[in-house]
Amino acid sequence: MTSDPNSPRGKSLFRPLSRIVFGLLILLLLNWGGASWMLWHRYDSLTSHLAQGRWPDLSEGRILHVENTGDGKAKAGHFLIARYGPQVAVEMDIPGQELSPLRLWASEDSLQLASLPRQQAFQAAHPDYSPLVEALRELGGQLPKADIGKRLLMSVALHPLVTGVRWGEGGLLWKIRTSKGSLWLNADAVPVEGGIAINKMRVRFAPAPKEEPPLPGFAAVTVPAEELVGGIAEGVRILGALAGFTTYSRAEGLRKSGAGWMVVQGGRAQMHLQGSSYEIGHQHGSLVSDEVRRLSHRLVYGVGLLYSLKKGEWFPAAARKLVERQRPFIASAYFEEMRGIADGSGVPLDLIQAANIFPEFFHCSGVALMGAATVGGELLHARVLDYMVGVGLQDHATVMAVSRPGVNRFVTVGYVAFIGSVTGMNEKQVAIGEMGGRGEGAWDGIPMSLLIRQSLETCDTLEDVEHLMRESPRTCEYYYLISDGKGPSALGIAATPNTFETFGPGEWHERLSQPVKDAVLISGPGRYEKLVERVQGTFGKISPDNLIEIIKRPVAMKSNLHNVIFQPQSLRLSVADASNKAPACDQPYQTYSWDALFSAAPSL
């Protein structure tokens, strides 16, 4: 027989049982709330420390083992940070990074950074860490914020619970189990042991070794402290950008400086510069002074630091030598313009010059189509720039319209602080793009970006550009694609300091073995074949909209920084820039007309 729950006996059994269940639920809820508080307290403590420019407490060092399985192949690395007496040691082993493990030693009196596999190290005495403090503050200030609602939702999703307690070396430890893994936390809610899954990564915590990591057995090069600290600070910013934590947002609206102006609408920047070389440089620098400082530091110190560790030569010093080596080949007007940028922005001139001769290794594509290939026979010229999305160049993308007395007006799709051009068109309907090759170290000539700019300013026809490039001292190995709306016509150029080859529409070249009628197609292995396939598949029907589809991945690479569709005959261009989450080929395009680019400042 079963007991009737409404009977006196049933009620006497049900009431205690319900109280037990209710009590257990209360305890479970309290457990969940306490575990959630511990996790959020740790996150708040971390963001607070970083926002103040401080590392978290290093009295007990930590080593984080990271396994990334994002592409289906496990890639393991680690991050160690610990204090050993007066010195802080940091070691990073980044999966897939040929320079790692990187090891850093920092104290009040000295700083050293080494790439262990490259056996390269740089050191400085009496460093001022304020640039690094500022970088940490920026990182802490941009880490994701969560209000009470988001915290509740995330806590429900993680459903953390305290499932164990034990005594550790530093005191009481609490085991927190979540849906993503388990962690042992100390009394300050700092992870001591355990592992947790974050997106496509598995992170495992462990105590740092008790013994200090040894100094490398190879010599370190002594460099200026402000440059080494600056490089590490920019490295922090680059890592923050790669992780998606840090972004740069431009203020919307119109700015003016002399005859120059700049307008930012919807995140897109358009700049108009007019006057002498010095005047357009000064307008440029004063219109975007903060961005000039930010990007020149990012390139010379941040990317330059990676270059230094890879090559074993301190990049800022090498860049200054390279400026002097190339000075005889560069028009004095361009040095005047760089001086104007430095004066207008307040950034040292040597830093502006170094940023402008930064070695350019682009892996790009170019397409010129006309005649039977396109709708109405219109000349279309697509330029695909694949280059360093991870360092945040796209945050400073700008379409610049430049008017200087005595030369052609031109438009360049580029980046602040940069006076050269890798993607441009002039008022004579000539458009130019390029693709980088090999030849690093062959620097005795006009830098590629300044050779393109000089071509835009001084050449009226495709033949003029060919002649200038053929007769000028050149650097490295580059492939140029030039189009001229007056023909219409197009030409590919393969050039090194000692060789110069040309190929026109439908012509064969050893690197471009599948020529297409009324087309010049330039890209890298694998991408070139896909480009040919897409052009042939839409031959005769290609419009600007079709061309945008043709140059999408895999023709464009993951590092697709910007794409431009030139329409030289109508002096129009459509531009797409990468975002911090997607390549340029997946972004919307903005179309610019010549009249709008060279008009008076708009009224907003």
Image (spheres, grey):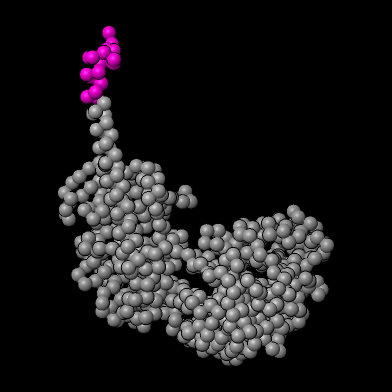
Q: Residue furthest top?
A: 1
Estimate the x, y position of residue 601 in percent, counting from the top left: 65, 77
- Residue 215 forms part of the magenta stretch: no
User: How many numbered badges does the structure rendering display?
Assistant: 0
Residue at left offset 56%, top offset 86%: 282
Left or right: 572 in relation to 45? right
Quadrant location, the N terminus: top left
Comparing 398 with 431, the one in front is 398
Q: Which residues are magenta?
A: 1-17
Left or right: 537 in relation to 172? right
Rendered image quadrant of residue 542: bottom right
Tell me if residue 201 comes above or below residue 454 in the rendering: above
Left or right: 499 in relation to 372? left
Rendered image quadrant of residue 96: bottom left
- Residue 4 forms part of the magenta stretch: yes
Rendered image quadrant of residue 270: bottom right
Estimate the x, y position of residue 548 in percent, counting from the top left: 68, 59
Estimate the x, y position of residue 5 in percent, counting from the top left: 29, 16
Residue at left offset 43%, top offset 61%: 245
Q: Is residue 314 visible in the rendered structure shown here? A: yes
Estimate the x, y position of residue 424 in percent, counting from the top left: 67, 75
Residue at left offset 23%, top offset 29%: 20
Q: Is residue 418 visible in the rendered structure shown here? A: no
Tell me if residue 394 comes above or below residue 26 in the rendering: below
Residue at left offset 59%, top offset 64%: 266
Comparing 127 with 254, the one in front is 254
Left or right: 257 in relation to 484? left
Quadrant location, the C terminus: bottom right
